[in-house]
Image: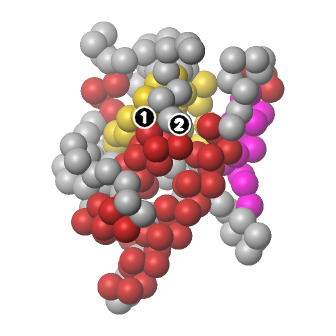
Amino acid sequence: MSPPYNVLFLCTGNSARSIIAEVLLEHWGRGRFRAYSAGSFPKGEVHPLAIETLERFQLPTTGLRSKSWNEFSGADAPPLNFVFTVCDRAAHEVCPIWPGHPATAHWGVEDPAAVDGSDDQKRRAFIKTFHELEARVRLFTSLPLDTIDSMALQKRLDAIGKTQTPGGENA
């Protein structure tokens, strides 16, 4: 087996979406991937409903933390193979130069932490985000990364970010 692919999920605050994506890729990647997450302006803590959602689906939450993307742009950083933005704001920001020139794509998902409403409405938003990211991560982990050429790979990564759910919403 080849060494695991290093994947970084980016968001502005690194408190919800990118954290959830990190955990999902660690789970569904089954050792083929090493997942990380970071933010351009990290909140400094993981959103409590992100933790609650991950635990609801029996996924590990130990060691999760909100961190800056600067941790992944220096000489000590793991060499990245893929970088995915999961929020529209981070997709439009000027990103650091990533060592190794990883493949990049935008997989925008609505911010569940921005939902106003009852606790139940907020929980539903986090669960929706979880399922949207899970669908994309599962598609990504099914790609034949060892045999696909870079142009075809980029098209597939971009298409995953535009995946539609049966209800017509972005997945």
Please tell me which of labels 1 and 2 falls first in the chain: 2
Residue 151 against residue 158 in the figure, above or below: above
At x 80%, y 26%, the residue is 152
Question: Mark 1 and 2 residues: CB-CB less than 8 Å, in contact?
Answer: yes
- The amino acid at mark 2 is Gly
Q: Along the line of sight, which residue is nearer the eye, 68 or 167?
A: 167
Locate residue 73: give its quadrant. Answer: top left
Query: Label 2 neighbourhood size at 10 Å, few (<14), some (14-19), many (20+)?
Result: some
Q: Secondary structure at mark 2?
A: loop
Residue under pointer 2: 29
Rendering coords of residue 12 (x, y %): 37, 48
Rendering coords of residue 45 (x, y %): 20, 53
In this picture, residue 108 sits left or right of residue 55: right
At x 38%, y 86%, the residue is 120
Q: For the residues carrying marks 1 and 2, which lies nearer the camera in this image?
A: 2
Residue 153 against residue 113 in the figure, above or below: above
Q: Which residues are magenta?
A: 153-164
Say how the picture is coloured: secondary structure
Is residue 109 visible in the rendered structure shown here? yes
Quadrant housing the N terminus: top right
Label count reads 2
Residue 94 against residue 2 in the figure, above or below: below
Residue under pointer 1: 35
Q: Most prominent secondary structure in the magenta stretch?
A: helix
Q: Along the line of sight, which residue is nearer the eye, 101 or 7?
A: 7
